[in-house]
Image (spheres, rainbow, N blue to C red):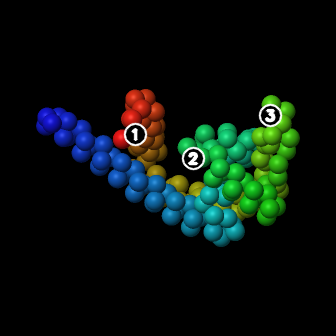
């Protein structure tokens, strides 16, 4: 193994650990923000995905980078609790569209003031909106690069 190979492996490992930590930090923040509205982070995430327009579970899963089954479980819970409802999907008879109910929209609305405060604090901690946009661009570039990696064979 060359020094460049070792450096690349360290970079991959350190980047992955940082992203894992970042994911945990975002989930913790999302739990703190959503709890007073009677939601969990996962419920908020799924409801938030369908605020602009109803989507099937597979569409929500693709947008979030998770499995359709995990979204389906959350969607069923949201429907059971009256925070979302299923609508017929003209494009696919079996894959119903999930849409928020007025109660679901109200729960999201209750999160918005604390979400705005957290967003302002994060932007300040990053050094401003421009720096925040640079960080987002770097994370987006990282995500795009990961999707372009060749498949790694299972061993």
Q: Is residue 121 above or below residue 150?
A: below
Q: CA distance from mark 1 to mark 2?
A: 20 Å
Whether tag 1 and tag 2 are in contact, CB under 8 A, the answer is no
Q: x%, y% of residue 56?
A: 73, 41
Q: Residues within 10 Å of mark 1 (few under 14, many from 20)?
A: few
Disc 3 crowd, CA 10 A, few/some/many (<14, 14-19, 20+): few
In the rendered picture of this protein, how many numbered marks are placed on residues?
3
Mark with earlier residue (2, 3): 2
> Which quarter of the image is occupied by the C terminus?
top left
Kindly indicate the quadrant of the structure image that contains residue 75. Answer: bottom right
Image point (20%, 36%), residue name: 5
Looking at the rendering, which quadrant does residue 106 occupy?
bottom right
Callout 1 secondary element: loop
Q: Earlier in the sequence, mark 1 or mark 3?
A: 3
- The kind of secondary structure element at disc 2 is loop
| Mark 3 residue element | loop
Q: Residue at point 69% right, 68% down? A: 38
Quarter of the image with the N terminus is top left
Q: Is residue 124 above or below residue 63?
A: below
| Mark-to-mark CA distance, 2 and 3 | 21 Å
The residue lying toward the viewer, choosing from 20 and 116, is 20
Q: Earlier in the sequence, mark 1 or mark 2?
A: 2
- What is the x, y in percent for residue 93? 83, 36
Residue 114 against residue 48 in the figure, above or below: below
User: Which residue bears the numbered disc 2?
Assistant: 66
Q: Is residue 130 at all visible to an observer of this figure?
A: no
The dot on residue 154 is: 1
On residue 92, which mark appears?
A: 3
- Residue 37 location (% of width, % of height): 69, 67
């Amino acid at each position: 193994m060359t020094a460049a190979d070792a450096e690349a492996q360290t970079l991959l490992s350190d980047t992955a650990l940082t992203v894992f930590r970042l994911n945990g930090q975002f989930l913790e923040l999302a739990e703190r923000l959503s709890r007073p509205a009677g939601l969990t982070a996962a419920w908020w995430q799924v409801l938030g995905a369908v605020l602009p327009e109803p989507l099937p579970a597979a569409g929500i899963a693709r947008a979030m980078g998770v499995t359709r089954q995990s979204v389906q479980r959350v969607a069923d819970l949201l429907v059971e609790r009256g925070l979302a409802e299923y609508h017929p999907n003209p494009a696919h008879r079996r894959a119903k569209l999930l849409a928020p109910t007025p109660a679901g929209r109200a729960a999201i609305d209750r999160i918005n003031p604390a979400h705005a405060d957290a967003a302002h604090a994060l932007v300040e901690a990053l050094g401003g909106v421009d720096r925040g946009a640079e960080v987002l661009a770097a994370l987006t570039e990282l995500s795009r690069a990961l999707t372009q990696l060749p498949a790694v064979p299972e061993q």
